[in-house]
Image (cartoon, rainbow, N blue to C red):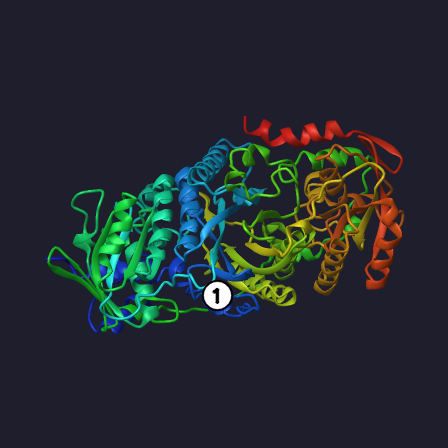
Amino acid sequence: MEAIPTVETAKSLGLTSEEFFKIIEILGRNPNFTELSIYSVMWSEHCSYKNSILQLKTLPRKGKRLLVEAGEENAGLVDIGDDLGCVFKIESHNHPSAIEPYQGAATGVGGIHRDIFTMGARPIAALNSLRFGDPDNPRMKRLITGVVKGIGDYGNCFGVPTVGGEVYFYPCYNHDILVNAMSAGILKKGQTVSATAGGPGNPVFIVGSATGKDGIHGATFASADLSEDSHEDLPAVQVGDPFQEKLLLEATLEAIQTGAIVGMQDMGAAGITCSTSEMSAKAGCGMRIDLSKTPTRQENMKDWEILLSESQERMLIVGKPGQEAVLKAVFDKWDLPCAEIGVTTDTGRLEYHYQGQKVADVPAESLVLGGGAPVYVREQKKPEYLTKIESFDIQSVAEPSNCLEAAQIIWNSPNVASKNWITQQYDSMVRTGTMTTNRPADAAVVYVKGTQKALALTTDCNSAYVHANPYIGAMIAVSEAARNIVCSGGEPVAITNCLNFGNPYNPEVYYQFAEAIRGMGEACRKFETPVTGGNVSFYNQYTDKNGEVIPVFPTPTIGMLGILDDFNNMMTLDFKQAGDLIYIVGVNRNDLGCSEYLRLVHHIEWSNCPYFNLDEEYALQQTIQKLIRAGLLQSAHDVSEGGIFVALLESAMPQNIGFQVLSDMHLRKDAWLFGESQSRVLVSVLAEKRGEFEQMLEQTGTPFSQIGQTTGQSVVVDGADWGELGGWKKTYNTVLNDIMQ
């Protein structure tokens, strides 16, 4: 006879004693082990957002282009005109990637694409946001190699281009790396499939790959700190098959066209448990499921293993009565299993049967966000390290005697240097819609076939800024994403976010989280870019052998969607010809806060967030949009990591066009060259358009300064020859390659 679970059983599954007794209250009896396992995954942070949902609800969730509000469906849906919608979302796969980097990253890519096509959209673009520790460390090299290969192999085989992203290297990620994957797809308006069960009497199918033991308790695994023994949790890492996913994509989109589908949901975290409970709760109905009918890869799987498995490339479909044969015919055509495993009911309960016995019976509503799942607000405490940051004084930093040497040190930073070792492993050209493969821009621009439109997509977050000031740093993350969209010729429309933080039970971490949400919300309201969804990834911290807790930098990654109503308005970042005038639009300041320069040249780890003012940023972006639409710019590139000097080199390298510039004599030379104060854009302008360009800036009241002009192939700063552009370009392209050899 099966032993009755106890409080200790609940704790071993990641539940608290209070949650265990709440389950007893809901059921009116003690749960059996299968039922307790169901609650343990559905009430995990990964599925229930129990420590974050109240904060998330403060974010703006409505917008003029949104077709669904945040949380209503698997991903955000935005009206892009021409009777089309864009579905997009970003999610994390951090813990699995830290344990098994190849499969962890690959299944992260597969999962986010399924979120897109489960709504009826065909994915057309993928992006990512990656955080690693010291790349010279052998373990980190293994993780980097595995993650990049996993992303590349899955995306390349699946046939969706990886068009953009970001990569940072900081010591705080030496144990817990971050792997955030984003996908965007296109559908016709009115053809969206909802994640709902409809009403009672509808047949329920599991389609796609057979169910195995991989990924069991993956949601629980993602809701706990990693430790020295976490490698023993390898079964919590899923195994992906991109070719099976390609078949599932085509079969799913074809099945939608039959009209035989009521609702559909990807089986991601918590597998069958999650999809059956969320679809039932959304419709206010129940389901009766026979787990014995689930196709399995392994013999003698237990009922709770089938329920909790996170095997990849699977969907739960609720069909229309009488249309069962139609659905099965489509999946037979694509050689995919399509098993009818149950039926929807009017009970509001999830009844799971296995081998002729009822193994679990729970109210669907009690499992989901906004239903019976617990909700908490944790204690906040301003981190002590902020005192050191706030005491930083730029006057304590000696100006270098040789700025050229400082520039070379910064240029050799993996955070600044080319990521071509990584990006060359990704296919960016499949589907032939990527417009920025050979025309570099601040955001990825993807043509929407059959229209004049293009999507502008970006992922952004400088976590060092957020660490220095969670409120301002999160505002900068949103603003930089918007700035990248604008500099590429697009209009920012909406965001998805991936909120990567340490343990929420740590008051200092929760302070970071709450302040970041506050800053993000304020910036999103300013730019009218509502939050369409995403995910929260807590527990990204590590306790070493000495008992020291090492959380990652707070990393609220922003995935932003922008729209170009006419792709001919696309703007690139590269200088076009010698003799063009170079300007900074915005204000240069004596600011070195959180710069690569401070960290690498002066070895200063504690400094203020760079200067930022939200109103100033918004006004700047409005002006840049006007300049682009008026045809007054040759190039536009935002000033970010490494400051003006890095921005100049990045604009110079694509066409091998050098520059000569003069620094502002009213500022420190190092601050002018390497400072990272925000709300600045580097632009180039035809000499004959100078008057019209400057007149528009004066009319809009936008600060600007001419700093130089484009030249042959040399780099000249304040009259000093800093070498040929070719030398800088060679270094840029080899830094990461040399490290990863």
Under tag 1, what secondary structure?
A: loop
Q: Is residue 448 left or right of residue 728?
A: left
**Residue 348 appears in the picture as rendered:** yes
Picture coordinates of residue 372 (x, y %)? 34, 71
**Residue 450 in the image: x percent, y percent?**
54, 51
Query: Image quadrant of residue 399?
Result: top right
- Image quarter (top left, top right, bottom left or bottom right) of the N terminus: bottom left
- Image position, residue 564 (x, y; %): 63, 55
Question: On the picture, is 62 further left or further right than 730?
Answer: left
At x 36% / y 39%, what residue is drawn? 243
Between 101 and 209, which is closer to the camera in this rendering?
209
User: Which quadrant of the view contains residue 230?
Assistant: top left
Residue at the disc numbered 1: 70
Camera-nearest residue between 534 and 457: 457
Task: Evaluate whether residue 213 shows in this view.
Answer: no
23 over 677 or under it: above or below: below
Name the spot of residue 67 as percent of width and height, x first.
Answer: 50, 66
Left or right, 157 with reference to 599: left
Task: Say which amino acid is labelled 1.
Answer: Ala
